[in-house]
Image: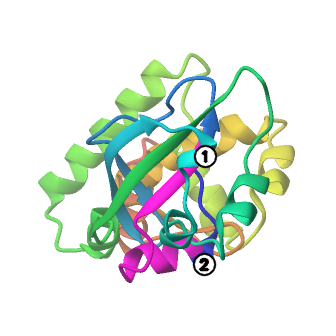
Amino acid sequence: MLFRHEVLTKIAAGEVDLAFRRWRRPAVRPGTRLRTRVGVLEVGEVEVVPEDRVSDRDARRAGYPGRTELLADQRPGEDRQLYRVDLRFAGPDPRVDLRRDTDLSTADLDGIVAELRRLDARSGRGPWTTAMLELIDANPAVRAPDLAAGLGRETARFKADVRKLKERGLTESLAVGYRISPRGRLVLDHLTRTAPD
């Protein structure tokens, strides 16, 4: 589920606690946790609702001025149903603290490197994690499509790989592009020091 930044801000502030989406089938289930720019959102009840049951109050709870604007913003299609999704702000993104955590022993760093090596081994295209960290370190705040094009890769797959590094606290997203995190800096320095000659 994607949200505009202003809606995310209102969810974090407790001003928005509903979302409406027209889907062929639900894209989220109760209990799903979504990581966003403002923190973690938790999905509550997900139910199909007829349009005539959507009130102006519901629309305001979803961040719209009224039901007319909410319904006009929904994806068209006879094969789609309107879903009402309860939301709540569940707290800050745990990756924020992780990427700032630089209290790492040599054994911790070796463990992270071993995990990166496993990612490399499963990729089907060979080692990529160190090269990706080096690329982001050398090109902070560069658009993902530009970085992907420089590698001859499709943007969506490139972003999926960056997310794998982000999950481990090694990179962080900026308004445009990415940068290496303090934790990522330690790991990259460790990789450089321990690389075979």
Residue under the image location 27 percent in, 47 percent down? 112
Residue neighbourhood size for the residue with mark 2, other residues' Cα within 10 Å, grouped as few (<14), some (14–19), many (≥20): few
Residue 78 place in picture, x, y as percent = 77, 23
**Secondary structure of the residue carrying numbered label 1:** helix
Q: Which of 103 and 14 is in front in this view?
A: 14
Mark positioned earlier in the residue sequence (1 or 2): 2
Say if the magenta span includes residue 19. Answer: yes
For discs 1 and 2, the disc positioned in front in the rendered view: 1
Q: How is the image coloured?
A: rainbow
Residue marked by disc 2: 6
User: Amino acid under label 2?
Assistant: Glu
Q: Do the residues labelled 1 and 2 touch (CB within 8 Å)?
A: no
Q: Residue 1, relative to residue 62: is it above or below? A: above
Residue marked by disc 1: 52
Tell me which segment is drawn in magenta: 7-21
Judged from this view, the residue extending furthest toward the front is 52
Q: Residue 78, relative to residue 16: is it above or below? A: above
Tell me where residue 93 sits by quadrant. Answer: bottom left
